[in-house]
């Protein structure tokens, strides 16, 4: 027993149960989004996708090779990077967006716990975020409110 305590002391401190809750909330949030991608295969096109296409083909942040300032650059840049990493696989890009969106449940629970001081409120708010149908849909479509909301 003493040997185990010495080893535990050297390898680091004991993992906090709070991290297990965050991990569980992340997976509870990502599962419906991935299921939505697999079962319904939502379309993934639109202006943001076209801007990312132009950025990859001609190096211009715009449409059809023409520069534009009508759209914020963050999401098309993200899509361009995701397309390079995933070799243009739309399902991988949607899954990546679902994972990024699922991190929001963790931060929402942290915020709710900080504001209310109650773990139950934090978990309840994160579960609402995880299972709200419109948020599931918006997490996997190519629009500016998917990953980077407009300010």
Image (cartoon, rainbow, N blue to C red):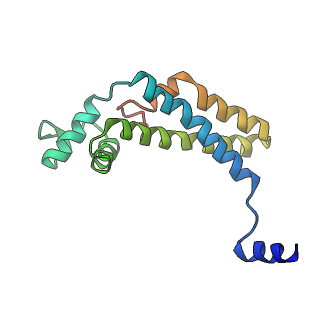
Q: Nearer the viewer, residue 70 or 53?
A: 53
Q: Is residue 54 left or right of residue 37?
A: left
Q: Position of residue 81 (x, y in %)?
A: 30, 49
Q: Nearer the viewer, residue 37 or 151?
A: 37
Q: Is residue 148 left or right of residue 12?
A: left
Query: Is residue 27 among what the camera can see?
Result: yes
Q: Residue at x 42, y 34 (%)?
A: 146
Q: Position of residue 37 (x, y in %)?
A: 43, 29
Q: Is residue 45 left or right of residue 110?
A: left
The answer to whether 82 is drawn above or below residue 149 in the figure is below
Q: Position of residue 41 (x, y in %)?
A: 38, 25
The answer to whether 40 is drawn above or below residue 63 in the figure is above
Image quadrant holding the N terminus, namely bottom right
Instruction: State how many labels appear.
Output: 0
Query: Is residue 151 among what the camera can see?
Result: no
Q: Is residue 83 left or right of residue 24?
A: left
Image quadrant holding the C terminus, namely top left
On the image, which quarter does residue 126 sit in? top right
Q: Residue at x 66, y 43 (%)?
A: 24
Q: Residue at x 49, y 33 (%)?
A: 34
Q: Residue at x 70, y 49 (%)?
A: 20
Outermost residue on the right side: it is: 1
On the image, which quarter does residue 42 sit in? top left
Q: Nearer the viewer, residue 132 or 39?
A: 39
Q: Position of residue 79 (x, y in %)?
A: 31, 43
């Amino acid at each position: 027993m003493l040997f185990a305590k010495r080893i535990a002391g050297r390898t680091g401190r004991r993992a906090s149960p709070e991290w297990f809750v965050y991990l569980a909330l992340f997976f509870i949030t990502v599962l419906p989004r991935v299921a939505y991608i697999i079962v319904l295969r939502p379309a993934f096109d639109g202006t943001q996708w076209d801007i990312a296409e132009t950025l990859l083909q001609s190096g211009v942040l715009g449409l059809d090779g023409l520069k534009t300032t009508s759209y914020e650059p963050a999401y098309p840049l993200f899509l361009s990077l995701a397309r390079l990493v995933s070799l243009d696989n739309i399902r991988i890009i949607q899954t990546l967006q679902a994972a990024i969106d699922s991190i929001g449940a963790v931060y929402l629970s942290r915020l709710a716990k900080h504001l209310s001081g109650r773990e139950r409120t934090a978990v309840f708010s994160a579960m609402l975020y995880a299972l709200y149908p419109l948020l599931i849909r918006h997490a996997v479509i190519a629009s500016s409110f998917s990953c980077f909301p407009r300010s």
